[in-house]
Image (cartoon, helix red, strand yellow):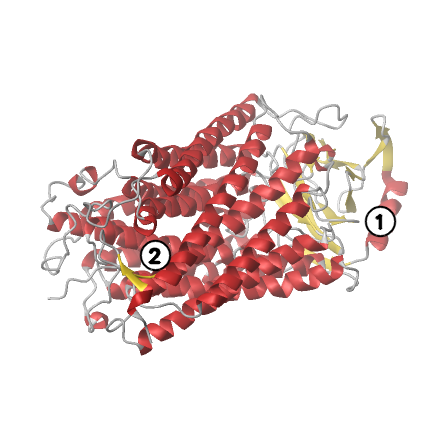
Amino acid sequence: MSTHNTLTPPPNDWWRHPIGRDEVIWISVAAAWCVIMTFMMIYWYFAGNQNQAGEAYRISPEAFAAKADEMVDKYTIRTETELEVPVVAVPPGGDVYIVSSQFQWNVIPELKLGETYRFHLSSVDVNHGFSLQPINVNLQLVPGYDYVLNFTPNAVGEYNMVCNEYCGLLHHAMVGRLYVVE
Amino acid sequence: MSNDSEFRTCPDTGLRIHLPAEKLMKANAVAAVVFLLIGGIFGLVVALTRWPAVHLLPAEWFYIALTAHGTDVLIVWIIFFEMAVLYFTSTVLLNSRMATPRIGWVAFALMLVGAVMANVVILDGSSTVMFTSYPPLMASPFFYLGLILFAVGALLVCFIFLGTLVIAKQERTYEGSLPLVVFGALIAAIIAIFTIASGAIILIPTLLWSLGLVGDIDPQMYRLVWWAFGHSSQQINMAAQIAIWYGIAALLFGAKPLSEKVSRMAFFLYLLALQLGSAHHLLSDPGGSMSFRVFNTSYAMYIAVLGSMIHAFTIPGSIEAAQREKGLNNGLFEWLRKAPWGNPVFSGMFLSLTLFGFIGGITGITMSVQQINMIIHNTTYVPGHFHGTVAAGTTLAFMALTYWLLPVLWRRDVFMPKMAQWSTWMFGLGMGGFAIFFMAAGHLGVARRHWDMTFAGNPLGFEYSATVYLFMGVAGITAVIGSLGALAYILYTVGTILFGKRRPDTAAPAVSDEGVEAITSYGNRSKGWEAPGSMVLVAVFMVFLVVYYFANWKYLGSVWGIR
């Protein structure tokens, strides 16, 4: 009888040793669980309301900024704070352009409860993070890519957009606001 | 051919050690511990800055320290230590000489120069880009060059490892198949080769870009290829630490695997799809279709998850079976209660196994679900999770191995053994607690890599709830406890090497093998359970996982419609 352990070579016929009942049961449970998790993602893609795969397009930072400026010119209803950040009320179903740059957000969007908006998220310099608080939805903003997602707010209130991808030495100063109204 | 004058036989363990390999093991292990100290200090000051009541560093130094912390512990400490593990498993466990010690020293020099170079340009403030260094943020060219030199050195060691396996086979230094632990190390080395190639593919063009020789680096492509390096390197750690867990089970209990076949297959699963699984870092990115995302995070990732879940049973199971064989057969858990909890080799090993599974594993499986990723991406949940895997898991497993390896390699009495006993508990529970509270704060929205969660003086700022501040405060306290544990480990290591009493070759073994008897068989497999206690442990694990997994789906379902 060989006296091997994990540090010594196994017996020559190790491949033919039977697998114990404990292991068979646990491997079956673990494998079944992995299958369930796989189908859960696919199920949610068709049946769930939250899927961030969305659409994405290549776009130059200049072209993206130009589209955002057009939105600001058309839909600004007031400005807020001493920085005079424009509050934009895009009509339901319209395109909302969120431009992130070191170290600010371009606008304060004002949305209507229960309406759907086509959000375009991008950056005009480095990577940024779009973190919507307090609901804690977090997306990666990559320069050169227009990340398009349909947002349907389900509660009124004041929200904040926090940058949560390190973007430079004043990263922590990059915070913005978003309203959802009746 | 091997020359006997190049070997010594360890009087404690009976292991035959190739002297040139031993010198390289020592050099790599010492370099690892030095960088753990440097990186650990940076980690401590980062934690003390994120602890709201302390808020230690100014902003610029916070981001510098954070870049250095990630680079020094996640890359330098862990990979230097893994190099020592590759030398140990391929030479000592196979009773073989090593291939080309000279190239081993070239590799060591490259790694050391690379690590020092990266540290210098991080500290001079020219490379404050975090260790992920996403373009278009640009670091000093020496930052990328340093990482490339380090990686090339590590790649050479992987090839020396493979060369040593060939020599051992040719010179018939062992019979039959590789021991399980060496097989695990081989899997780690293969993953490392893939990982380092990915790193080179992305870092070399980025170096050229920082020198102005390449126009631009597509930032989304960089994230895709960089994570084939960044995540796969965590799979090297997994394979290495699991090999170490199996090894310690044999050193302390004489344990053999419940089934060689199952344990080897579980290692092999890591190879099948690991590079694709890395795509779970891009789940909340603009690039990549739904089918790309689901394929990469289901088939590709769950194959590796399955491997880990198998080890989660077979490792405690093999210890349980060995203990029961010795008569600790009462009830479900006598084998575990009467394990040597006072021995840091065991406490470190078993804590790292448990914390890795329950904290790192459960949260890792949940956060890498395509849709759920959106409610944790880039919050403190992410560093919370990987302190559960890399600190409480990998680093603690390496510490446990050190407590066994150090007296063997240096032949010295251990320095302050009581401190060593405490260190594994302090580091494990400190880092485990930090992971939990950082993740809790992340669930409530706190951004990672962020200097000021109060948004002081910002007209658009807002306030997090008192609960968030409580979680961040407790995370700070637990980080300090973990740091003290790491400091005790470093003091033990340095103290033993410098001040430990040199052991005469006739002394009683420093590494006690009392109670370690070779296990010949685990009895009759057809009757009863082999490891009922371990079955209960994995059942508890499964319940936690299922509840936590669906709780996150439920929360996700309550947020805005996002499609």
Question: Image check: B116 left or right of B474?
Answer: right
Nearer to us in this view, B208 or B378: B208
Q: Residue furthest bottom?
A: B170
Residue drawn 77% across the image and 39% down it: A105
**Residue B1 seen by the camera:** yes
The numbered disc on residue A65 is 1
Residue type highlighted by circle 1: Ala
Percent x, y of residue B446 = 59, 34
Residue at horizontal 70%, vertical 60%? B206
Closest to the observer, B32 or B260: B32
Image-quadrant location for residue B89: bottom left
Q: Residues within 10 Å of mark 2 (few under 14, many from 20)?
A: many
For residue A57, the mark is: none
User: Where residue A45 sits in the image (x, y, percent)?
Assistant: 55, 55
In this orientation, which residue lies closer to the viewer: B371 or B113?
B113
Q: Quadrant of residue A103?
A: top right
For the residue labelled by badge 1, is the local secondary structure a helix, a strand or a loop?
A: helix
- Split into 4 quadrants, where in the image is the C terminus of chain A? top right
Q: Which is more foreground, mark 2 or mark 1?
A: 2
Label 2 sits on a secondary structure element that is helix
Residue B255, compared with residue B552, is above or below; it is: below
3D distance between C-alphas at marks 2 and 1: 52 Å
Three-letter amino acid code at the position of disc 2: Ala
Q: Is residue B269 visible?
A: no
| Residue at 51% from the left image edge and 38% from the top image edge | B40
Quarter of the view holding residue B468: top right
Q: Is residue B383 left or right of residue B512?
A: right
Crowd class of label 1 (few under 14; some 14 to 19; many from 20; radius 10 Å)? many
Mark number, residue B243: 2
Tag 1, which chain? Answer: A
Provide residue B295's location: percent of width, then percent of height. Answer: 51, 63
